Image: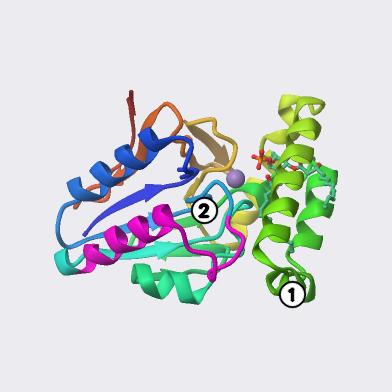
Amino acid sequence: MQRFFIADIHLNQDEPGITTGFLHFLQSLPSNSELYILGDLFDYWIGDDIVDQLSQQISQQLNQLKSRNIATYFIHGNRDFLLGQTFAKLCSMTILPEVSVLKNSDENIVILHGDLLCIDDLSYQKFRRKMHSKWLQCLFLLLPRYVRLKIATKLRHKSNLHNQQKYEYIMDVNQQAVESMMNSHHANVMIHGHTHKPAIHQFNVDGKPLMRMVLGAWHDGVNYIHQDQHGELKLIKIDN
Ligand code: LP5
Ligand code: MN
């Protein structure tokens, strides 16, 4: 079974090139494979009840994957954590827990968006806990569309301002957090996105070789990880 992993596509109305690249990528997927979307499929998501031309187009195309026997899985990102079962059903995709494990006979791959690993970013982790509070989410979803849009725009703006003042290492993953998560899931491979720093990191813990593969964002081109029938993993980057 071939698997494809992507994250941080950040689909939005203002960058039609990303949508075109994404739709081509979907077309190119082979039959009988699996697609894992590890968060931030959309630049932001403010409720399944707010559909636009872009989200309709995306749900139609994702839904069509099942006719080629391609199973689609989704893990929430920090921009689209409000994407719910209603939209997931339209896309025929299964929402997985925020940290999930793919078990093979000789390896365990832990998959996640990646923001959970950025534990040195204390203000973000505090913000994240608030955003993940169920009552706040329910309240937010009751607000009229224009108010939700206004809040999301404000949050994006604040986030950009904060990010400009943070050191690079603060916004990257913490190695201890990586090792501890891999250890608790008995994983030898980890795949995540969020940091927009595509790379393969190989390291040893207690003499065991481990690998962390980081997916890149799609602003400059197509970015994915391919696992072939033999289990070999490759990070693929096709710049525009
Ligand atoms: O997204 P990115 O990569 O630029 O930065 C992230 C962290 N930022 C975020 C915020 C998102 O971008 C906002 C997304 C909006 C989604 C839809 C709205 C749904 C609302 C639901 C309400 C229940 O995730 C950024 C990290 C960075 O990754 C790297 O890891 O650093 O974190 C921050 O910037 C957070 C700041 O550190 C603290 C934020 C203070 C916000 C102040 C709130 C102001 C209230 C205004 C509301 C009207
Ligand atoms: Mn992210």
Of the numbered discs 1 and 2, the one sitting upstream in the chain is 2
Q: Which mark is residue 39?
A: 2
- Mark 2, other Cα within 10 Å: few <14 / some 14–19 / many ≥20: many
Q: Is mark 2 within 8 Å of ligand 2?
A: yes
Residue at the image position 73 percent from the left and 69 percent from the top: 143
- Mark 1, other Cα within 10 Å: few <14 / some 14–19 / many ≥20: few
Asked if residue 116 is positioned above or below residue 139 in the image, the reply reads: above
Report ligand 2 position as a quadrant: top right
Amino acid at pointer 2: Gly
Q: Nearer the viewer, residue 16 or 63?
A: 16
Mark 2 residue element = loop
Q: Position of residue 41 (x, y in %)?
A: 47, 51
Give the left or right position of residue 133, taking residue 190 as reference: right
- Magenta segment, which residues? 45-66
Q: Is residue 68 visible?
A: yes
Residue at the image position 67 percent from the left and 54 percent from the top: 149
Asked if residue 2 is positioned above or below residue 32 in the image, the reply reads: above
Q: Quadrant of residue 171?
A: top right
Give the left or right position of residue 157, taking residue 95 as reference: right
Give the left or right position of residue 83, taking residue 25 as reference: right
Q: Quadrant of residue 104?
A: bottom left
Quadrant (top left/top right/bottom left/bottom right) for the C terminus: top left
Q: Which residue is mark 1?
A: 134
Task: Tell me, yes or no, whether the two marked residues, 1 and 2, touch with CB atoms within 8 Å.
Answer: no
State yes or no: residue 51 in magenta.
yes
Q: Which mark is residue 100?
A: none
Residue at the image position 79 percent from the left and 61 percent from the top: 129
Residue at the image position 15 percent from the left and 64 percent from the top: 68
Amino acid at pointer 1: Lys
Q: Position of residue 131 (x, y in %)?
A: 75, 61
Q: Position of residue 197 (x, y in %)?
A: 54, 30
Q: Nearer the viewer, residue 161 or 28?
A: 161
